[in-house]
Image (cartoon, rainbow, N blue to C red):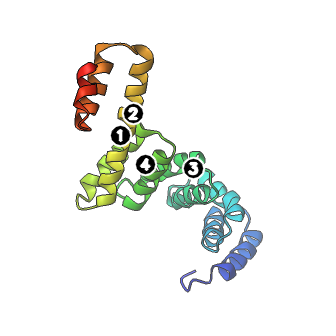
Amino acid sequence: MGAGRFDEAARIYAELVQAVPGEDGLRLNLGMALSMAGRPREALPHLQAALDSGRPELVPAALFLGGVHLELGQPARAVGPLETFLAAQPANRDARRMLAETLLLLERYGEAAPQYRTLTEQAPEDPAAWYGLGRSYEGLSQAAFADLQVAAPESAEILLLVGGALVAQERDKRAFQL
């Protein structure tokens, strides 16, 4: 694995898993090798088994499992493993970024915002973290506006919000009409 020969490592780990069944550390390594060899579907059951063992030293399985689900186009299934990994290693910025981006992709803005907020606190110079935080807040504000439109479509609050937006766009006459 250290030499980057992941297919060969996967073959060796598969033999070891066969020879020593029930050794979840070997299953983790097999899953990691398969994942890094570009074989995420094959990696999935091995990573899940390692994670299901409940052994704290195998928590990296959660990170790889989240990554495999993302690679397979299953972002909703990636959230749980990524949260599990972050619970064990909260200072890991790469895992937090993966979780934040996944939540943003799923339009779960209320959950993405605190992840991005933590990233901006961990690395205030990181523009991607600030951008993600802004996108999260933008999504929250759009959802709140949509809820307000449903709850009170002709309210003064709606008219003020739309009027303010029109003023910002320099469409003062239309804003004044509202």
Using the image, tell me which numbered label, if any, was put on residue 142: 2
Residue 60, given in percent of the width and then of the height, sits at 51, 61
Viewer-closest of 124 and 174 = 174
Residue 126 appears left or right of 90: left
Q: Nearer the viewer, mark 1 or mark 3?
A: 1
The reply to whether callout 4 and callout 3 are in contact (CB within 8 Å) is: no
> How crowded is the residue under tag 1: few (<14 C-alpha within 10 Å), some, or many (20+)?
some
Considering only order in the chain, which callout, 3 or 1, is on the residue closer to the N terminus?
A: 3
Residue 33, given in percent of the width and then of the height, sits at 62, 73
Considering only order in the chain, which callout, 4 or 2, is on the residue closer to the N terminus?
A: 4
Viewer-closest of 8 and 101 = 101
* Residue at screen point 41% across, 20% down: 149
Amino acid type, callout 4 = Ala
Amino acid type, callout 2 = Gln
> How crowded is the residue under tag 4: few (<14 C-alpha within 10 Å), some, or many (20+)?
few
Residue 158, given in percent of the width and then of the height, sits at 33, 20
